[in-house]
């Protein structure tokens, strides 16, 4: 009798095993399909977790001498671990959790082997005393990387408190902050296919996360924090770069949550929480009579809480170039000053800036479904140049009132454009819109910038995104040959890596003005 019962039970068990195997195989096939679909739709980005079957070579910084006690200097150990990991495909440089590693200035240089991941689960901390730093330019610098990922659940702490002390003072009713001689926490240069995910960045001496000459970057689910009164502690700054996707990030600092600088295009920001801080800024553009180009920026989904600005475009008098094809939509303001602000008279000098006729052209800017409360009486400020008025400014479904519940106002100087739906507060000089085609610039991005110009030597193979043309340098180098055009970076205030500014003629390292 017992044998008769055992046989059916064994058969039933075998059937269950086969069904489970088939189900697991189906699930695996479905997962493979999803992964393949992701890779096809993100060709410009390298996937963090490529194939489940790839072997990952783990390089733990502790095995290279790092001591996670928050006291020992781990700079050399981190550098050695990077060099070892960089040479291996599918490598993971690991900073283990529940430990604190103190490092000085580091330069993580590429190129490296494919699928390189830097995983930070513990704490990486800078020195508290500025005198202990090797230099005051960049703390953690990454360069010439492709398909690189910086991720984890850990913290990168710039320990900026002592750097901030005494940096700001009031002059002629303005707060002037020194933005020199303080380092950026993290900077990426000349890199493509980057993913930054999950980390917490905090307390940078100056900017937290900066990109220069980068392409194809995804920033997902990171948080950046610094005190409201910490000077120039921007969250994410993007310069001379393109094809960025910022998604579900939380930023609260003493300056811009996100700043988009000259030479940048095709920037998408989704589901951002910003505050405290100075909002999302395009610019500043055109400083010191320079040419600037920014195009195809799309902000879709953002919340601003107690910020000094909301959606801001800022340009200097005397500049040239263009900021265009910009869309802001589905944004909530909570007690934000200057929720919508275009300012073509931006000036941070202690004395008033000189009036100039030339300006960066601002055109094709859309504000759609912007709602909430303003801490300033003028919730919408369109302060455009009379010599270079703003063009094609579109307001649609705007509802902004004062935090007190009273009616807010709109200030419109020299902005031309349209409104549709309910726009509160109403803006003068904007025409009611007939049924106009919705802009699809974010779906079919096209850069207006010339991408085939080379600003650096042939070894770098780096594309410059400025729209100006190189000068004719024939006979401009006082008899020296060959005399070639070169784009140099000229900026008295900011670190020179950030701002490509003007063309010059160059011969054997010497500079000649065209």
Image (cartoon, helix red, strand yellow):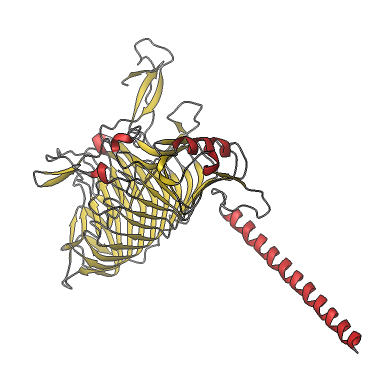
User: Is any atom of residue 449 visible in this view?
Assistant: no
List x then y, in percent, for residue 510: 36, 17
User: Is any atom of residue 400 visible in this view?
Assistant: yes
List x then y, in percent, for residue 208: 35, 46
- Quadrant, the N terminus: bottom right
- When asked about the image quadrant of residue 332, the answer is bottom left
Total number of numbered labels?
0
- When asked about the image quadrant of residue 496, the answer is top left
Please say if 377 is above or below 64: below
- Quadrant, the C terminus: top left
Please say if 324 is above or below 456: below
List x then y, in percent, for residue 200: 40, 54
Residue in the foreground of this view, choosing between 219 and 288: 219
Please say if 8 is above or below 178: below
- When asked about the image quadrant of residue 172, the answer is top left
Left or right, 195 with respect to 155, comes to right
């Amino acid at each position: 009798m017992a044998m008769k019962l055992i046989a059916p039970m064994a058969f039933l068990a075998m059937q269950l095993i086969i069904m489970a195997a088939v189900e697991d195989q189906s699930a695996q096939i479905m997962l493979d399909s999803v992964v393949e679909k992701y890779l096809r739709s993100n060709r410009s980005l390298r996937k963090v977790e490529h194939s489940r079957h790839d072997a990952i070579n783990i390089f733990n910084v502790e095995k290279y001498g790092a001591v996670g006690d928050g006291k020992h200097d781990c700079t050399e150990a981190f550098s050695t671990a990077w060099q070892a990991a960089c040479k291996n495909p599918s490598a993971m440089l690991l900073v283990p959790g529940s430990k604190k590693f103190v490092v000085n200035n580091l330069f993580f240089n590429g190129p490296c082997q494919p699928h390189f991941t830097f995983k930070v689960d513990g704490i990486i901390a800078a020195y508290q005393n500025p005198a202990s730093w090797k230099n005051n330019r960049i703390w953690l610098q990454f360069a010439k990387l492709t398909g690189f990922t910086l991720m984890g659940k850990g913290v990168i702490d710039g320990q900026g408190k002592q750097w901030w002390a005494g940096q700001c003072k009031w002059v002629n009713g303005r707060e002037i902050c020194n933005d020199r001689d303080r380092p950026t926490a993290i900077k990426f240069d000349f890199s493509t296919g980057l993913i930054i995910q999950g980390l917490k960045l905090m307390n940078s001496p100056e900017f937290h996360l900066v990109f220069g000459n980068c392409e194809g970057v995804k920033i997902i689910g990171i948080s950046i924090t610094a005190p409201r009164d910490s000077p120039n502690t921007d969250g994410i700054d993007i310069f001379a770069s393109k094809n960025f996707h910022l998604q579900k990030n939380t930023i609260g600092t003493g300056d811009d949550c996100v700043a988009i600088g000259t030479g940048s295009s095709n920037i998408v920001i989704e589901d951002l929480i910003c505050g405290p801080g100075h909002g999302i800024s395009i610019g500043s553009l055109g400083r010191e009579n320079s040419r600037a180009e920014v195009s195809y920026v799309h902000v879709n989904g953002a919340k601003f809480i107690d910020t000094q600005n909301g959606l801001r475009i800022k340009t200097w008098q005397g500049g040239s170039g263009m900021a265009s094809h910009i869309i802001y939509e589905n944004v909530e303001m909570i007690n934000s000053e200057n929720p919508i602000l275009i300012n073509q008279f931006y000036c941070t000098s202690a004395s008033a800036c000189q009036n100039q006729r030339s300006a960066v052209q601002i055109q094709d800017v859309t504000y759609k479904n912007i709602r909430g409360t303003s801490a300033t009486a003028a919730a919408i400020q369109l302060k455009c140049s009379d010599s270079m008025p703003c063009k094609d400014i579109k307001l649609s479904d705007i509802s902004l009132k004062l935090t007190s519940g009273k009616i807010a106002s709109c200030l419109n100087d020299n902005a031309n454009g349209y409104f549709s739906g309910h726009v509160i507060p109403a803006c003068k000089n904007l025409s009611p819109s007939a049924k106009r085609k919705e802009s699809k610039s974010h779906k079919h991005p096209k850069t207006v910038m010339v991408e085939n110009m080379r600003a650096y030597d042939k070894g770098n193979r780096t594309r410059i995104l400025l729209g100006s043309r190189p000068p004719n340098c024939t006979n401009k180098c006082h008899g020296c040959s060959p005399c070639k055009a070169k784009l140099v970076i000229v900026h008295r205030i900011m670190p020179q890596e950030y701002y490509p500014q003007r063309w010059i003629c160059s011969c054997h390292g010497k500079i000649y003005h065209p």
